[in-house]
Amino acid sequence: MPKLVIENLHDLSIETQKERTLLQNIQAAFIDWMHPCGGKGRCTGCKMQVVEGGEHLTPPSPQELRFMEQGRLRPQERLACQSRLLDGCLKVRVPKECRLPHVHYSLPK
Ligand code: FES
């Protein structure tokens, strides 16, 4: 089963279902994750910085490609609501601008 590790949430690890987006998997594990547009690919609030294993993700969606063209998604950034993990292990970080005030993140990155 694919595995997601969130580095700056104390290396929290969850097993994921490849039929679900990463945001859906994160929510199913009761992890708070910013998603201002409700997972519709309209806001970039659910960004993740890919640390390792990006090759296991589905290709960027049209919404992600548009944000990349606009410079709103940097290299190594993906949207949790638009990507699915097909296999293997993916390690990500929550970028600074996407952190929630009530969540304790483990690295000052
Ligand atoms: S929740 Fe808005 S783009 Fe993912």
Image (spheres, rainbow, N blue to C red):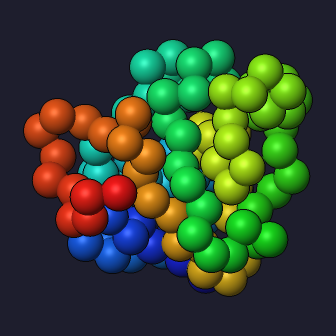
Q: Residue at x 68, y 42 (%)?
A: 74
Q: Left or right? Give the position of 36 relative to 68.
A: left
Q: Left or right? Give the position of 52 relative to 61.
A: left
- Location of the C terminus by quadrant is bottom left
Where 47 sits versus 86, above or below?
Answer: above
Where 71 sits versus 15, above or below?
Answer: above
Task: Evaluate whether residue 73 shows in this view.
Answer: yes
Q: Residue 73: x, y in percent?
A: 68, 35
**Closest to the observer: 14 or 7?**
7
Q: Residue at x 43, y 46 (%)?
A: 95
Q: Residue at x 45, y 59 (%)?
A: 93
Q: Residue 91: x, y in percent?
A: 53, 72
Q: Residue at x 73, y 49 (%)?
A: 75
Where 22 sits versus 57, above or below?
Answer: above
Q: Left or right? Give the position of 70 relative to 20.
A: right
Q: Residue 100: x, y in percent?
A: 25, 36
| Residue 107 figure quarter | bottom left
Q: Residue 94: x, y in percent?
A: 41, 51
Task: Evaluate whether residue 9 shows in this view.
Answer: no
Say how many tags the image has.
Answer: 0
Where 32 sits versus 109, above or below?
Answer: above
- Location of the N terminus by quadrant is bottom right
